[in-house]
Image (tube, grey):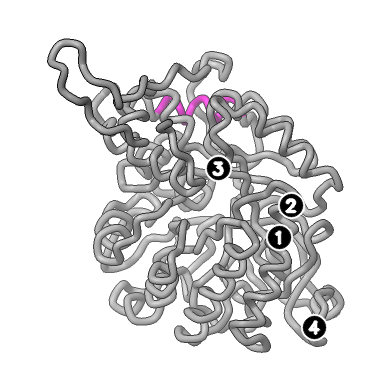
Amino acid sequence: MNVPSYRDRTSTRTLSIATVAAAMVLTGCGAGAPTASPHSSDLGASPALRTTPSAPLSSLAPDRTATTAATTTAATGSPAAACTNSTKLAGWSNRRLAMLTIAVPASETSVSDATSEVSAGAGGVVLFGSQAPADLGSRLTTLKSHVPGHLGLLVMTDEEGGGIQRMANLVGSLPWAAYMGTHWTPAQIQQNVTKVAKKMAAAQVNMNLAPVVDVDGRNVAPSKTNPDGWRSFSGNTAVVSKAGVAYMNGMRAGGVIPVVKHFPGIGGSTYNSDFGPARTLPWSTLQKVGIPPFTAAIKAGAPAIMVANNTVPGLATSPASLSSAVITSELRGKLGFKGLVVTDSLSAKAISGAGFSIPAAAVQALRSGADMVMFDLGGNVNSQTSAIATAITTAVTGGHLSRSRLIDAAGHVLAVRHVNLCP
């Protein structure tokens, strides 16, 4: 008897009970753990939205950064402002700042396809696929050599565990989060995740779009109607909080930046936002059930958080990834999160269903407090990236997005990689 099928971003797969049992390959994982053969990730496969023509990426060459402010002014002899990343970024063009806030999708078997975008200053690359090439590390090293100023590059993927693994053939397999939360102690979760993270880092992948800290105890495969299922550690908030921090710390211990998702919690959602508009639990309920795992992660030093595309009844009528009430007021304000805020895929049908093209959604996300935007692999990535960068720069020029907010977002992208622009 087949379990519900789960089409998550690039393919449709039917997970059978036999497959679930057979795919447990990590040493120490008991029989019967929920898992499946690797498939695709948290970034959706909904068709790329049509955008207006824009400048080719060849026109996105970075400008020079501002000279150091550590000198004195010739006119007054008074010391200039101290050099910080913000003062340096203030000397960048709007176009270069915009590019730093974009994570570009690429196939893990053809990472060189993102060379023009990386050369133009893209802040990150999101790898798609399910079977990484043996020489992925050397390919990524070559790609990183094209980063302007050699400022580093966020190379990210979805390596959650279970059926959401892109490079298990290189780094080893983890079971579904549901198995980890049920059968492993936090110490065991951290230990096993660290092993995988070390191999990810060795392959030049420095960011994992995990852990999922949504609270959802339903014993089902993720599906079109339920985005979590086995992706969640538990239906118990306390268990999710401890397991999520353990997973996060395991990634960090292995040299990989974890991204805690999907704020403010999509456990119990009405639908999977990749396929259409979706609502979370009511905000009054979410504050008690869904927020504590994020609070725990932030207190434990979470470096990055992904914001969901679901609306939050009682808090925001627009998708959370586009809502200042969710990002600025709650995540930044009340929870005091100071790290990198990334959106879930803006290719999701919940975004187009709310009336936004991908470029328009990118602008709105940045206005609302997000620092980095993502979209799907599909269509013309080059033109889509250019359209997003154009929309952002046009918004700044037209006064619809403040330059200071763009500088702030770019600063968060650099900070998560510990990049210091000052000599």
How much space separates mark 1 and mark 2, taking CA atoms?
6 Å
Q: Give the distance between the C-alpha atoms of the residues marked 3 and 2, in whole angstroms.
A: 26 Å
Please state which amino acid type lies under the numbered disc 3: Phe
Find the distance from the CA under tag 4 to the CA under tag 3: 36 Å
| Whole-number angstrom distance, CA of label 1 to CA of label 3 | 27 Å
Residue at disc 3, secondary structure: loop
Q: Amino acid at mark 2?
A: Ala
Q: Residue sitting at 49 percent across and 26 percent down?
A: 387
Measured as percent of width and height from the top left, residue 261 is found at 50, 63
**Which residue is more in the foreground, 318 or 118?**
118
Assign the N terminus to one quadrant of the image: bottom right
Rendered residue at 69%/53% (across/down): 201
Q: Is residue 88 magenta?
A: no
Residue 211's x, y, as percent?
Answer: 56, 67
Q: Is residue 282 left or right of residue 148?
A: left
Q: Residue at x 68, y 82 (%)?
A: 179
Q: Which residue is mark 4?
A: 28
Could you say which is closer to the camera, residue 268 or residue 78?
A: 78
How many numbered discs, if any?
4
Mark 2 lies on residue? 202
| Magenta stretch bounds | 382-391
Evaluate if marks 1 and 2 touch, with contact meaning CB atoms under 8 Å apart.
Answer: yes
Residue lying furthest front in this view?
77
Mark nearest the camera among 4 and 2 is 2
Q: Please tell me whether mark 3 or mark 2 is closer to you in this view.
A: 2
Residue 285 place in picture, x, y as percent: 33, 79
Q: Earlier in the sequence, mark 1 or mark 4?
A: 4
Q: Are marks 4 and 3 in contact (CB under 8 Å)?
A: no
**Which residue is most to the top?**
75
Residue 375: mark in rendering: 3
Instruction: Indicate which disc residue 403 carries.
Output: none
Corner quadrant of residue 422: top left
